[in-house]
Amino acid sequence: MHQDQRHVIIGTAGHVDHGKTALVGTLTGMETDRLKEERDRGMSIELGFAYFDLPDNSRAGIVDVPGHEKFIRSMLSGAYGMDIVLFVVDAKEGVQEQTLEHLAILDLLGISNGILVMTKSDLATADELAEAAEMTQEMLVGTSLEGIPTVSVSAITGAGIETLKQTIVEQVTLATKSEENDGIPRLYVDRVFTVQGFGVVVTGTLIGGSINREQRMVLLPQGDVVRVRGIQVHNEPASVAYAGQRTALNLSGMSAQDIQRGDVLCPIDYSQVTDNIDVSLQVLSSFPRIIEHWSRFRAYLGTREIFCRLILLVDEAILPGDKVQVQLRLEQPILTFRGDRIIIRDFSAQHTVGGGEVINPFAPKHKRFTPETIATLAQWEEADDAQIVNIVLANSETVCVPESFLYYYLPHSQTDVKTLLDRLKTEGKIVRWDESGRETLISDAERVSTVKAKIVDALTTFHEAQPLLAGQNSSQLRHKLSLDEQSFEKLANQLIKERQLVKDGNLLRLVSHEIQFSQEEETAKEKLEQLFLEAGMNTPTLNELSTQLPEYTPKVLASTFYALLNLGRFVKIAENFFIHKTRFEEISDALTTYLRENGTITVAEFRETAETSRKYAVPFLEYCDTQNLTVRDGNIRRLHPRHLET
């Protein structure tokens, strides 16, 4: 099947015994009741699947969803990924209680493409058929399926089947998804089994994008990496599965007992799970109870059933029929994207509570009932894609956010997202940090400007408080500003490129900063330099300075001394051993000349040449080794090869 061809999944919904499975059999010529138990009982327990060719030569997959109330979970599994629903009603019996619940779920899932199929038309009179169809259409008013076409059929006589197929073709043209060809692929597992000679096989409807044979993917929530050894689409081998296709994947790297319905396969780059989500929830008016804070419910996402606690953020209680923003605290982590449809049922699984959309898949814990929380939730629900990018980037813990993270909030075609990000960059609303070999990072432009200004302000304050220091330790500055390492590095480097900052080792300073000496420090500076020039190699330690220059306080001597060190006037040879730069250059030049003339030198020979003691000679030579001036060979030293004359 070619990528450009539309891949459509048709689902069935309606009361048990209203003829859904017989309808699928007539449409497809295939038996969807796979289990002996199903055939014996004459009802579908697990999801059945079949396919058939439409009059326009395209092929449609059809999921036969169980109708019995206790199999609602399977019904939800089938509805996920459904493009068109055949809403089945028995022409003789009309709408039943389960029909209403199925309709409520389809409405909550936002499935709007459908056909009302009146089955068993051969058993009803024309008047009965017309009345049942009219009453059902009235029931659809106000739901996502309002105004769908009606087709009457008989699985026994075949009446209306060709009309139904033609109507499906017409509805297919309405069923379009922007993320179809290059969205983020997700396959929610609804069946898992082992095939002898092949190994583990999982089936599901592929949502978004495509999956290739030999592709490595992640199975969630386990987090295990698996390889797709083989792909089947509509029972035929394929090298690629595309969005909208009913797909079977042969996996290596997992055993069947480690996989269950509700697990999801996704790309490695898009496998971040969450256990705290904000949801815009529509409660059914038919739900018989008031919902209280911290109530425990069952949530359904894709084919996954998961227990959760419902956090009330806006109201003290929720009444049937209310639409509110709530937070779900999930008892197990899930993979979810903004805009995903979610269904809530009560803990006993007797009633459908309601459903809605995920508005923030990685929600923080909110303070309940505050104006800030209410405003934040409203902003999340109403924002368009460009505003969502701004909200995510402005509120993330880090200034620089991986581009892939934005896709959890923009569940569209990757091409559409890239186009949006390109536009926002052109408009100056975002900053894109591209670096070869590393993932592209995105930042909010306004936030970048604000944080860069904070870095400059912090350094300005530091220089004012410490005028004799060359700069501030970069990691201390980062911690002071509570920035993560990656974001700080990006922003600091940009300031360096803009010639606002200078980095010297691990110190950062403003370009405009020059070490400023007070009048007293200026005289102390002159005396310290003179003292170290006269001492040659036999210099005093920092503690000995107070004895030799008693007219200055230890604080003035220390700050002035370190300023000279930062200015490069002193060279640190070892701990508590410093030499004036002029003397260091003279001694190292003399050492170089000696080695060129004699080839080698011992510590004793150097001590004599430099007129110093072993206390100073040994650390000086060791420092020369670290600077690649000399090379030690046992008890002697030679000139480093790079200093040899050619």
Image: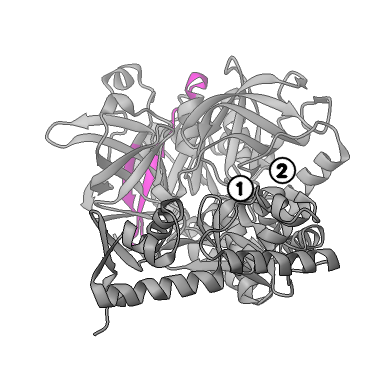
Question: Pointer 2: residues within 10 angstroms few (<14), some, or many (20+)?
Answer: few
Q: Quadrant of residue 442?
A: bottom right
Could you tell me residue 108's position as x and y percent?
Answer: 63, 38
> Magenta part of the protein: which range?
49-71
Please tell me whether residue 361 belongs to the stretch shown in magenta: no
Q: Give the labeled residue for mark 1.
A: 339
**SS of the residue under disc 2:** loop
The C terminus - image quarter: bottom left
Q: Quadrant of residue 24?
A: top left
**SS of the residue under disc 1:** loop
Mark 1–mark 2 Cα distance, whole angstroms, equals: 21 Å
Camera-side mark, 1 or 2: 1
| Cβ atoms under marks 1 and 2 closer than 8 Å | no
Q: Give the labeled residue for mark 2.
A: 142
| Relative vertical location of residue 82 with respect to residue 318 in this rendering, above or below | below
Name the one closer to the observer, 272 or 55: 272
Could you tell me residue 349's position as x and y percent?
Answer: 57, 18
User: What residue occupies the far right of the structure in this picture?
Assistant: 371
Amino acid type of disc 1? Gly
Q: Is residue 194 visible?
A: yes
Could you tell me residue 431's position as x and y percent?
Answer: 62, 68
| Relative vertical location of residue 366 with respect to residue 629 in this rendering, above or below | above
Amino acid type of disc 2? Gly
User: What residue occupies the far bottom of the structure in this picture?
Assistant: 646
Residue at (76, 37) in percent of width and height: 323
Residue 489 bears which disc, if any? none
